Amino acid sequence: MREQEWRKELRKQMTARERTQIKRTGMPETDPLERIKNNTEVNRGITAEMAMQEAKRCLDCADPECINGCPVGVDIPTFVKYVEAGEFLKAAISIKEENVFPAVCGRVCPQEVQCESKCIYSVRLKKEAVAIGYLERFVADYQNESASLYVPEIQPSNKVKVAVIGSGPAGLAAAGELVKFGYDVTVFEALHEFGGVLKYGIPEFRLPNKIIDTEIECLKKMGVKMQKNIIAGKTITFSDLEEEGFKAFFIGSGAGLPNFMNIPGENLNGVLSANEYLTRVNLMGAAKPGYDTPVFFGKNVAVIGGGNTAMDSVRTARRLGAERAMIIYRRSFDEMPARKEEIKHAMEEGVEFLNLHTPIEYIAGKNGHVSQIRLQRMRLSEPDESGRKKPVPVENSDYVIDADLVIVSIGVSPNPLVPKNLPSLQVSKWGTIIVNDKEMQSNISGIFAGGDIVRGGATVILAMGDGRKAALGIHKYLNYK
C-alpha cells in the first residue's frame, strides 16, 4: 500500500479529538534505592504496546513544525506513524535516513526544548507533547536487537579520501554522511576508545556503552574506517594526512578544556574538573578495584554547576558512595540549564540542591586536601546578556560547609591543540574555530569544523547537525572546487 494510503487509513481509525484525549505515556524507571548501587540504566524504555498507544496521539499535522525543531531534520511524523501501524523496523529505517545515532539521541537529546517544543500539543493545545524521544529510543532499540543490523544505502566508492578528526557526535555524524556519498572516510580518535563525549562524558546509567558501540559498529559496516590513539596535530600532522592523499578534513575535536573559577584553594587535592572526574570513571575504570591511580570517592561531595554534566557528576558520586552529594548553583531552579528529567532523577537519588549559592574559597584540611568550602549566598537581579536573571552576592552571608571532594562543572573551552597546529586557522576570542553557517567551512580551503570546537559547548544532537551540514559542505567542495 502506498504511503499516502496507509496514512489515510490510520487517520480514519481515530478522530483528532479522540487522539488528543490519550494521556502521554510515562517512562518506566529503575527504583532509586536500587539504581544508586550500580550503573543500571535509569530509564528502562517503553514497551511495544506503550509505543503504539503513544504514537496514536500524533495528529499527523499538514505542516509539522516538529521537523523544524530537530537539528538533523528527522521526518518525525512519518516514523511516528510507522510506530502506530506496528511497523517498527520501517520506523527505525526512516529515522536513520537523517540520524545515524537514534538510540543515543533517544536517550540524551533534550527533546523537550527541540522537536517536542514545536509539537502542536505544546504550541496550540497546551498539553504534553507527543513523546518523540521515547518513540525514537524504542524503535532504535528494537532495530538494534533484531536479527540484522540495518545499514543505509551507500553510493559506489569514488576513492576520494576524507579525514575526520574526533569520534564524538559531530565527527561520527559527518563520517556517516560522507561515506553515504561514496567517500573513503577515516576517523582519527585521540583516546583509546571511540565515541568522544558519548563515552567519556555520559555515565552508563544514562547512556550504556553497548548502545554507543552498536551505533559505531553500524558506521563501520557502512565503510567508515577508524583509528584510535592518534592525536591530530601531534602524533600526525595535517601535512602528513595530505601526503597520504586526504583531500578534505572535518574537525570535531570537541571542547575538552575545563573552566575554573580562579578562587582561593582551587589547586588543592580533591578539587577537580567534571571533565577529569567523568573521564576517569567512565572511560578509564578509575572507580574499579585495583586501578593504579584510583579516583577519590569522597563522603561529602560538592559539584559546582547546574548543567547536565553537573548532574552526571553528582549522580556518579552518589553511586560511588557519597553520603552527602550536593549541587551548588548560583541561580535558582528555574534558571538551571540541566534537563528537568535529570534534576528529577538526582532528587530521587538523594542529591541535595544548594541553589542561589556560589563557592568563594576552598579550605584545606590534612595533607593539603580540601576539607571545606566557603559559600556565598546569592540573589537574582535583572537579566544578563544570556536572558537569565543575574546572580549577585548577598552581603555578609558567607558560611562554611564540609566537603572532601569538589567537582567543578561550570563549562568547558575548545580543545586548543588543532588550532595551535594550524596557525592560519581563524579562531574566535574564545578559541572556537570560525566557520560559515551554511557549510561549516573554515577560512582554510578544505577544512571544515563542527560541534563543540565551533560552538564551545552544546548538545549531542546539535553537534550531529553540524556534522551532517559539514558533510554536505565537503561534498560540494570536493565536487565544485
Image: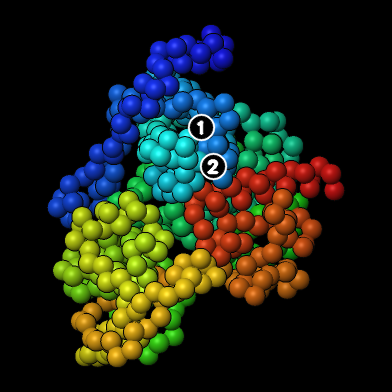
User: Left or right: 258 with respect to 152?
Assistant: left
Question: Quick one: 417 or 120, which is closer to the camera?
Answer: 120
Taking the spot 79% from the left edge, 58% from the top edge, the residue there is 445
User: Left or right: 334 with respect to 451?
Assistant: left
Q: Spatial distance from mark 1 to mark 2, Cα to Cα?
A: 9 Å
Question: Quick one: 477 or 158, which is closer to the camera?
Answer: 477
Taking the spot 44% from the left edge, 53% from the top edge, the residue there is 198
Taking the spot 17% from the left edge, 55% from the top edge, the residue there is 37
Q: Mark 1 points at which residue?
A: 76
303 w.r.t. 288: above or below: below
Amino acid identity at mark 1: Ile
Amino acid identity at mark 2: Cys
Q: Residue 64 carries which label?
A: none
Please provide percent x and percent y for residue 8: 51, 13
Q: Are marks 1 and 2 in contact (CB under 8 Å)?
A: yes
Please provide percent x and percent y for residue 263: 40, 87
Question: Quick one: 14 or 444, which is closer to the camera?
Answer: 14
- Is residue 118 something that shows in the picture? yes
Element marked by disc 2: loop
Please provide percent x and percent y for residue 230: 56, 61
Q: Name the residue under label 2.
A: 70
Taking the spot 22% from the left edge, 90% from the top edge, the residue there is 365
340 w.r.t. 218: above or below: below
